[in-house]
């Protein structure tokens, strides 16, 4: 083999390994950030021992400095402490909203995929009506009916994501339902519910772990949006959306009040997306 062939082969390997290295670096960075977010949500006092609600009027509107790394707000509260403690609110809201959406999606998708053509047709029309509303608009409609608040916003975000989950679950159910192992279970005399619980659902719900990971990031963004509009968590709660809402009045004079909560919303959503797609790739190649 000539030197030119060797160099060409090395160049080809370099081109193939380059994206893989970048992908691995992104996954590693997302993993580290996810770990930090989990630590912040579980033991926030370990990273920020201060009180997120403690006010100090003499320290109001301080830009980022050595004493206050992320600056202070209009009441002298430390932004860094509030961002760290706000991780717990945002992650819990995101996870709870995703659980609500997935649970409702499983119920609707299972009914559509397992109970015959009439039920399938009816559920499909119902899901299409829900899809006619943008997700955030559907959440706003729910809040208008039941009133603002953290719990209401969490349920509203969950309900707005449920139609998408239901459509995916229905499609998975229909695919798995025609598999050979389901036909074998039918021949062996298993009942419809035994086949559903033992064979169809376990093979249908496995990909939902990826959807749940991706859904948490989306739910956090939507919940923060509702809080920003004053329909979720309200100031002085240390929740990222509420902090954004409080900082918008001072956006030109105290940019750090909005910048750091917004930055962590974006970082959390990106982390969930990278991890979700990484899990999806590994499951496909397993």
Image (cartoon, rainbow, N blue to C red):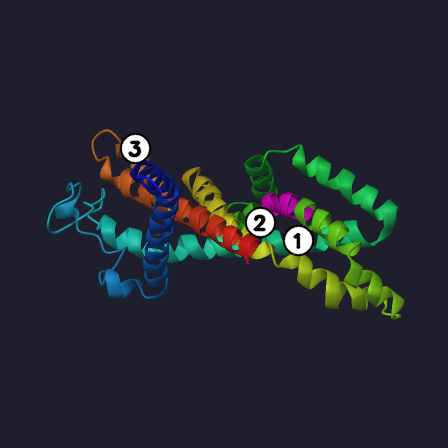
Residue 276 rendering spot, x and y as whole percentages: 48, 51
Q: Is residue 149 visible?
A: no
Q: Secondary structure at mark 3?
A: helix
Q: Which residue is mark 1?
A: 104
Q: Residue at x 74, y 61 (%)?
A: 200
Q: CA distance from mark 1 to mark 2?
A: 8 Å
Q: Which residue is mark 2?
A: 158
Q: Which residues are magenta?
A: 159-166
Q: Is residue 172 left or right of residue 284?
A: right
Q: Are marks 2 and 3 in contact (CB under 8 Å)?
A: no
Q: Which residue is mark 3?
A: 249
How would you rate the neighbour count of disc 3 (Cα within 10 Å): few for under 14, some for 14-19, many for 20 or more? few
Q: Is residue 231 left or right of residue 4?
A: right
Q: Are marks 1 and 2 in contact (CB under 8 Å)?
A: yes
Q: Secondary structure at mark 2?
A: helix
Dot in front, 2 or 3: 2
Q: Residue at x 15, y 42 (%)?
A: 62
Residue 158 rendering spot, x and y as whole percentages: 57, 49
């Amino acid at each position: 083999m000539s030197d030119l062939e060797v160099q060409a082969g090395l160049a080809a390997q370099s081109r193939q390994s380059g994206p893989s290295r970048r992908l691995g670096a992104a996954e590693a960075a997302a993993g580290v950030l996810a770990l930090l977010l989990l630590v912040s949500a579980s033991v926030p006092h370990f990273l920020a021992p201060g009180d997120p609600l403690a006010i100090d009027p003499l320290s109001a509107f301080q830009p980022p400095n050595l004493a206050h790394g992320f600056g202070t707000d209009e009441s002298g509260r430390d932004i860094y402490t509030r961002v760290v403690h706000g991780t717990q609110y945002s992650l819990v809201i995101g996870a709870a909203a995703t659980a609500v959406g997935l649970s409702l999606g499983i119920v609707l998708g299972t009914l559509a995929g397992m109970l015959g053509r009439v039920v399938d047709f009816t559920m499909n029309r119902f899901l299409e009506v829900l899809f006619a509303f943008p997700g955030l608009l559907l959440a706003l409609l729910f809040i208008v009916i039941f009133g603002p608040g953290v719990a209401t916003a969490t349920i509203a975000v969950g309900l707005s994501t449920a139609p998408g989950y239901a459509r995916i679950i229905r499609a998975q159910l229909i695919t798995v339902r025609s598999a050979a192992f389901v036909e074998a279970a039918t021949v062996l005399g298993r009942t419809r519910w035994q086949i559903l619980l033992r064979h169809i659902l376990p093979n249908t719900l496995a990909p939902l772990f990826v959807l749940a990971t991706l859904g948490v990031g989306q739910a956090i963004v939507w919940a923060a949006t509702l809080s920003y509009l004053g329909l979720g968590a309200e100031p002085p709660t240390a929740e990222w959306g509420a902090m954004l809402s409080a900082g918008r009045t001072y956006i030109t004079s105290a940019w750090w009040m909005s910048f750091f909560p917004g930055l962590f919303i974006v970082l959390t959503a990106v982390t969930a997306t990278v991890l979700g797609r990484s899990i999806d790739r590994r499951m496909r190649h397993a």
